[in-house]
Amino acid sequence: MLGLSDRGVERFLPLLDCRGSKSSIDRDVMAAGQRAEDLHRQAPRMRVRVLGVDGTGAAMAGADRGVLFFVGIGPGGGLIGVQAVHEEETEKVRRHVAKVMAEVGAEELRTDEHSVYERIAPEERHRLCLTPWRKSKGKRAFDLHRQAVADRAVLEAQTMEELLALLRKKPRAPTAPEELGRLVRRYINAHKGLPGKVNQLLQHVERTWEKVSDDPADPTNNATERMIGLTFKIRAKTMRGFKSMKKALAHPRLAFFLRGQDGVCDLRKVI
């Protein structure tokens, strides 16, 4: 609860006239996490309109393991589940995501642009997170602008400046703006060199523009990113990584349980 390492908790307990070894604390946290997971499984299945999915790495015993987070976005949302699946395991990811979508009755899937999330839900029900999309396209446009300036390609540099302005514009147009279509037509027949790279970027932006979420509540999938940070990444850094996948999966559920409802939780259920 204090966000300390097991050794840190061991040092803190004497202040409460209590004793506990690092190993026993580790076992207690593991057991509490398993009880929190059991409570979650026994509870009525959460129903959500938007399912947010994102993966993160888990350094363990010298190897990079993958963990997939499922979060309900919007009112009544929260941590739905955690799976030991790497985003590179395409079939496993797609199978798990499709299963969770069906279980929670999600109308929409919200993810980043990773190709593993394609073809899980119908195209009109799959929306891309705004921030990663804007960031990746902006970085590519900035790199091409810098190359164009170095090559003294005035038109290409101007085109990338116009694209960057469109990407940064707020509020963001729900449909591809006419200015973008004009830029695409300008390079439609370019296939080689710098103009070819500009053409590829412009067409990709136009093709994905309407797939990006325009949900006023959380277009960025920030709920999922926040859940990963609060229930997993901060703890992993404090502990210098989890020692086993079992512990890595138990902790997010325990951390979410401890946050409670309206800031209150019943510790007797897991202790």
Image (spheres, helix red, strand yellow):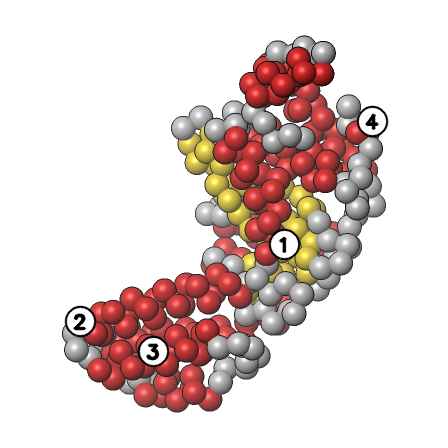
Query: Residue drawn 52% across and 25% down?
Result: 243
Q: Is there CB contact under 8 Å for labels 4 and 1?
A: no
Instruction: Tell me the distance, in whole angstroms, between the alpha carbons under discs 4 and 1.
Output: 28 Å
**Up/down of 218 relative to 254, above or below:** below
Badge 1 is on which residue? 223
- Amino acid marked by disc 3: Glu
Disc ID at residue 268: 4
Please state the horizontal and vertical placement of residue 18, each as a whole percent of the image.
Answer: 71, 12
Q: Specify whether 162 is left or right of 247.
A: left
Query: Residue drawn 58% across and 38% down?
Result: 232
Circle 1 residues within 10 Å: few <14, some 14–19, many ≥20 = many
Please state the horizontal and vertical placement of residue 87, each as a whole percent of the image.
Answer: 49, 48
**Up/down of 3 relative to 31, above or below:** below
Badge 3 is on which residue? 161
Please state the horizontal and vertical placement of residue 198, each as a whole percent of the image.
Answer: 30, 76
Instruction: Tell me the distance, in whole angstroms, between the alpha carbons under discs 1 and 3.
Output: 31 Å
Evaluate whether residue 207 shows in this view. no
Evaluate whether residue 18 shows in this view. yes
Circle 3 residues within 10 Å: few <14, some 14–19, many ≥20 = some
- Amino acid marked by disc 4: Arg
Element under label 3?
helix
Number of on-image labels:
4
> Which badge, 1 or 2, is on the more N-terminal residue?
2
- Amino acid marked by disc 2: Ala
Circle 4 residues within 10 Å: few <14, some 14–19, many ≥20 = few
- Amino acid marked by disc 1: Ala
> Which badge, 4 or 3, is on the more N-terminal residue?
3
Badge 2 is on which residue? 150
